[in-house]
Image (spheres, rainbow, N blue to C red):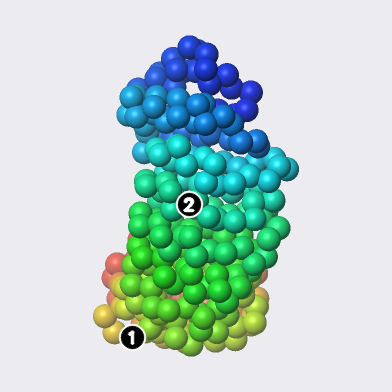
Amino acid sequence: MNQIIFNEKTDYTAPTFAEKLKNAVSGDVDSVNFIFGHTPLLDTLQLIDKLLQKYKAPPQVMLTFAGENALGIADFSALHSVTYLNIQNRYVSSLEGVQLFPNLNHVSITYVLEKELDFTPLVQCKSLKCLDVERRLTKKQHQAISKTPKLEKLKAHGLNISQLDIMPYLSFLEVHGLLNPMEFAKKLPCLKDLFILSSNSLKDLGFLSDMAKLEKLRIIKMGGIREFPSFKENNSLTDVYLRDMGNLCEFDNLKTLPQLKKLRLEGNINLAQEDLAWFSKKEFPCLEKLEFN
């Protein structure tokens, strides 16, 4: 992504800022990132937003909270053009105000110290499609995420499927430490892209067998898994990536994926290259790439 960054050293009132922003958005820049560690004057925020609208802002306008000072999201609501809120400030204690950004479609939350951070304001974000949370979720946070109306992409830690409601629009999930996945297919019926990392408490991937719309599966560091799961007929899975799964030794169920196009096996996997001799165009007529490292 071609991004231009402005921070607190930028003199937003100077003609040079307006000129630089104009040149950026009229060029090949597809993202502008405004980084703040303090709350600026309202006039400054209004000026930035006025110029963004005047010069037709790029597809992504990012607002990043950094530094060590407590910041209030609502204090930045004059930036109507913001599409991506990136919270890297440890002392943000509330998400109140996110609903005031009419074009907001992506929220990322990292380093925040408040474990019980209330996610309820996200429910009011009608355009929110992507959410990244780099911390273990509480039960209340699970419930709020479930109620976010149009969420399509989610990155989370400690995601407990039993605490979610049905999420009909979610198509991408990246999860560290997946928990209680028994109702996985029921809760996430439209998932197409799944990335599971470091979920060593799981001993069985059978919960994936009913994922009819899943197209891409990536699994990394799941030492408790011995067998690749069987998928039902008419599944959509075409791309499988497995890495560092030292106990995985049974691969016969890959034959339930006749439409498989890509298979990549890397790192600590209990499989020798000669064990893949049964891979053939007869078994996998669509296979385009087979990688074993």
Q: Residues within 10 Å of mark 2 (few under 14, many from 20)?
A: many
Q: Residue 6: which quarter of the image?
A: top right
**Amino acid identity at mark 2:** Val
Q: Where is residue 52 in the image (x, y as percent from the top left)?
A: 39, 28
Direction right: furthest residue: 68
Which quadrant is the N terminus positioned in?
Answer: top left
Q: Which of marks 1 and 2 is nearer the N terminus?
A: 2
Q: Where is residue 286 in the image (x, y as percent from the top left)?
A: 29, 67
In the rendering, which numbered label is found on residue 98? 2
Which quadrant is the C terminus positioned in?
Answer: bottom right
For the point 46% across and 45% down, the residue is: 84
Q: Where is residue 183 in the image (x, y as percent from the top left)?
A: 44, 86
Q: Can residue 103 be seen in this view?
A: yes
Direction top: furthest residue: 15
Above-or-below relation of 293 to 29? below
Q: Nearer the viewer, residue 122 or 195?
A: 122
Q: Can residue 178 be seen in this view?
A: no
For the point 40% across and 57% down, the residue is: 125
Marks 1, 2: nearer the viewer? 2
**Amino acid identity at mark 1:** Lys
Name the element at disc 2. Answer: helix
The residue under label 1 is 232
Q: Is residue 291 left or right of residue 279?
A: right
Q: Residue 233: which quarter of the image?
A: bottom left
Q: Which of 117 and 130 is in front in this view?
A: 117
Above-or-below relation of 217 to 79? below
